[in-house]
Amino acid sequence: MGSLQSDIPEEPTAPTDAQKRANIHEDEINLIDYFRVLWKRKYLVLIGSVLPALLVGLILFFSPRNYKVTYVYDLKDHGVYDVGGRSVYDVGGRSVYDVSNWNLDEKNYNVFLGGFYSEENLSKIVNSLRVNGLDRYAGLISGSGGREGLNKLVNFEVWPPYVNISKVKITDPAKLERIGQLKARLLNMTIVARAEEELPKIVSVIRNNVEDVIPVYSVKRGAIDAIRGYRAKMADIEENKFDLELTLKTNKSTLAKLKDVKPGISGQNEPYVTLQFDIGGRNEYLPLGYQIQAVETRIIELEENIRAAEEKYGYYEGVLALNKKLLSELNNKTSSPYTIQQVHLFLTDSVDGYEDEKIKDHLNSYIKRIENRMSASSPVTEKPKVCAVSRGTAKKSAIVFAISLMISLFVAFLLEGLQKSRTQMS
């Protein structure tokens, strides 16, 4: 029995008041030891934390400032509406791709950025910077810099900003579609330079690219869409041609047989034979003469429809050839800094080469839209205010001070620990 009782562990006893006071006293001693270490290593902590922050502050203060300027573009709508996901412009009842304004919904804005940051366009910007003696800025973009390097020179923002649909708690498909179709009204382009005297040259390069070169990509995309659209219309005409001609042939055969029908019995009130005739899904009985007139009218309508379809086909064929010619010109020239002004000159020189007045009218209307696009490329003001970019000296110095202070404290306690270890070993 005694051995069993000895195996039972004793219940832990609560600490006495004396033990509590001893623990508190020990904590106070440890805290005092910490302060002693800090006081002993005060110069290390002071110099190690203040000196780096001071150096960073001085470097930022005396380093040359960057300068920036912001251009605002008014993205006005000129009667553009959306059909099948494409921006169109109505001219004489015909829907064609519009290049007369920016039309920056979120999709087209991403297309704009894609063209601006494309490898082909980056190469154009780099070459223009080198021509203007801005080799160090060209070096930011060329090589592995690419888009990140160009972002150090230019930044785009739209207003109102596009809504992130993934963060919107809306499940109604109609509302989501309307949100996705929202268009920006203003485009802000901010250009940055390391020296104020270099800013005008950089502004000239970037503005020329955005206002004169990038619109050519829109014209090219419009030509591609137009070619697809006119091919589709021509295919529809060819597909309907057989049905129209077959219906015309059937009506002519019906007319010939109706004319062979003999008149009715003499002495009746109606001198003509009445036959069953379908009108609007109802069976009616009309005089033979009326039936002949109705079929003749139908034949005239079919013949006019066929004639109109052939005329449309010829027109679409001519416009298709025009857009193919434009696309070929753009494919040959867009690898170089080809501008919207050069596109305009190419189109105006092409007008006299067409004898068909309808094709001329179409080309002239397209030239007018190109001119509208050129005028829409101008910013709200040509000379916005140049601002110095804030260096953030105080904020960056405070961050460096906090990091340096933590490192200095760590080094101070580390040195104290090493010193105690050496003392104990000796």
Image (cartoon, rainbow, N blue to C red):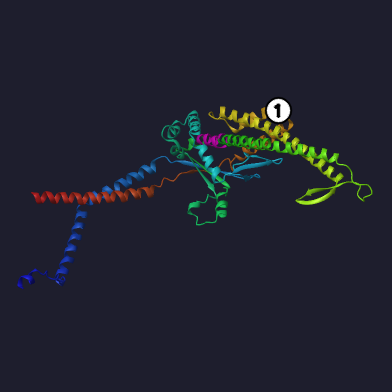
Residue at image position (52%, 42%) is 110
* Location of residue 356 in the rendering, given as x and y in whole percent from the top left corner: 73, 30
Above or below, 416 against 376 in this view is: below
Query: Label 1 belongs to which residue?
Result: 354
Instruction: Tell whether 84 sits left or right of 197.
Output: right
Q: Looking at the image, can residue 71 be seen? A: no
Residue at image position (84%, 49%) is 286
Q: Is residue 358 magenta?
A: no
Tell me the magenta residue range.
Answer: 201-213
Q: Residue furthest bottom?
A: 1
Q: Main secondary structure of the magenta part?
A: helix
Instruction: Tell whether 215 sits left or right of 294.
Output: left
Q: Nearer the viewer, residue 424 or 262?
A: 262
* Location of residue 23 in the rendering, given as x and y in whole percent from the top left corner: 17, 66
Residue at image position (32%, 46%) is 54
Above or below, 117 against 8 in this view is: above
Quadrant, the N terminus = bottom left
Q: Nearer the viewer, residue 292 or 276?
A: 276
Q: Residue furthest right?
A: 267
* Location of residue 71 in the rendering, given as x and y in whole percent from the top left corner: 55, 42
Tag 1: residue type?
Tyr
Task: Describe the element under mark 1 as helix, strand or loop.
Answer: loop
Q: Looking at the image, can residue 320 be seen? A: yes
Above or below, 294 against 10 in this view is: above
